[in-house]
Image (cartoon, helix red, strand yellow):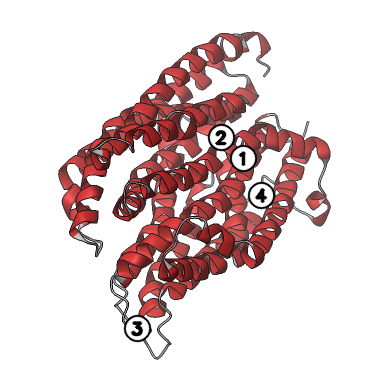
Amino acid sequence: MSKQTTNKMGTDEISKVMLRMGIPMILSMVLQACYNIVDSMFVARIPDAGGVTGMGERAVNALTLAFPVQMLIVALGIGTGVGVNALLAKSLGRRDEEKAAKTAGNGVSLVLIIYGAFLLFGIFGVKAYIGSQTKDAVVFEMGSDYLLICSVASFGIVMFSIYEKLLQATGKTMYSTIAQVAGAVTNIALDPILIFGYFGLPQMGIRGAAYATVLGQAASMALAAYFHYRKNTEVKTGVKYLRLEKSVVREIYSVGLPAILMQALMSFMTYGVNLIFGTVSQAAVTAYGVFYKIQQFIFFAGFGLRDAITPLVSYNYGMGDQKRVKQGVFYGVLYVEAIMLVGIIGLEAFADPLVGMFAMSEETKRLCVLAAKIISVGFLFAGGNIALQGVFQALGCGMDSLLVSLLRLCVVVLPLASFFARFENADFAIWWSFPIAEFVAFLAAAFLLLKAKSKIIKPMKERRTV
């Protein structure tokens, strides 16, 4: 067994180390939400041209239609990263440096393959995808232009996803946050310059928003890669570790595949909701797209804390420390619920001014405020689901995490939305699909936690080694 410095995840007080790890991750994830909401805020102000009115709202609609594919890109990158994160943290907890190095190297190779797939989609599949959701020629052209750029240049986001998780797995969350901040600042600064054509540059409209996004992602990737190769001294690097090994890939995706499917379900749900809400009105589609991006600030903060729960619980699970695993579960749920409670209060109190930041029609604004006030009712249930999904991933119960996602993102919400869309007051009823789905999923998550405690956590005392 090789000599290795003791990691803070196995020694420091759980309640404190989770916050030290989680706060930078929360900041990182909230800044990631900036990519989409900043684009929407600026493109909503694109002026009318060529005799076409409502260009800004059409542009927001185009981003809403493109968003599921962007989510799918993130799903594959982050999902693979989650598997790498859990396996790397567990390998470090067991002092297996060689396994840790292979895990990191294989993760980099896997996301390069993922980028190749989206490069091909960008070249050959964008127009068919956007055309399946709209008949509006202006929205079709805008959505196709935006998604083409984001897909062809998606190397930034998929590569950042893996380097971010490699840093998080070793507890170096501040470095991943610095990289995320750099990308967010780049995106925010370039958006108005490229969209409206400042400083002598051409006015590129929605294509400028896409270029700002991918350049921000590339900046994050470059910094995260630098920090990993220069600062992550616990993980050995080298070309030989990039060679894919079947056993390592299998272990990565034993946790990563359910995480990918879990993230991809968000993409599938958004695409399905776009189609269902389109039968109610285009205003409902746009309102949902805008609210979803506002909601991301709250949910992504929860995801950031979840990303601290996973390596922390996984590391102590690898050590066989039952007490610290239990503490990780308790504080993880407590902290995520606190985040969601703040989100509920914020949305209930400030929905109107938040929605007012977007230049939309009065009907779209009305529906967006309605969505905020109804959907936020289910945030406490959503917080429990998010935290427990991180716990399930850490314990190797990826399928349990996937089941919770299936319930909250597809199995319940889409049939309910389709049912409510037939109501006479559909523009009010459809929003209740989301809190109902979160409640059903929470009941399932609580049952699965009890099962995990009985079968995995409780017997750990017998397996502990020092």
Q: Residue furthest bottom?
A: 200
On the rendered structure, is 403 left or right of 99? left
Q: Which residue is mark 3?
A: 50
Number of numbered discs visible in the structure rendering? 4
Answer with mark 3 or mark 2, whichever residue precedes in sequence: 3
Answer with mark 2 or mark 1, whichever residue precedes in sequence: 1
Q: Amino acid at mark 1?
A: Asn
Q: Whole-percent x and y of residue 21?
A: 46, 41
Looking at the rendered image, the disc whose residue lies closer to the viewer, 3 or 2, is: 3
Q: Which residue is mark 1?
A: 85
Looking at the rendered image, the disc whose residue lies closer to the viewer, 4 or 1, is: 1
Residue 233 tag number: 4
Q: Whole-percent x and y of residue 453?
A: 53, 13
Q: Whole-percent x and y of residue 186?
A: 44, 69
Mark 3 vs mark 2, CA separation in Å: 53 Å
**Residue 339: in sight, yes or no?**
no
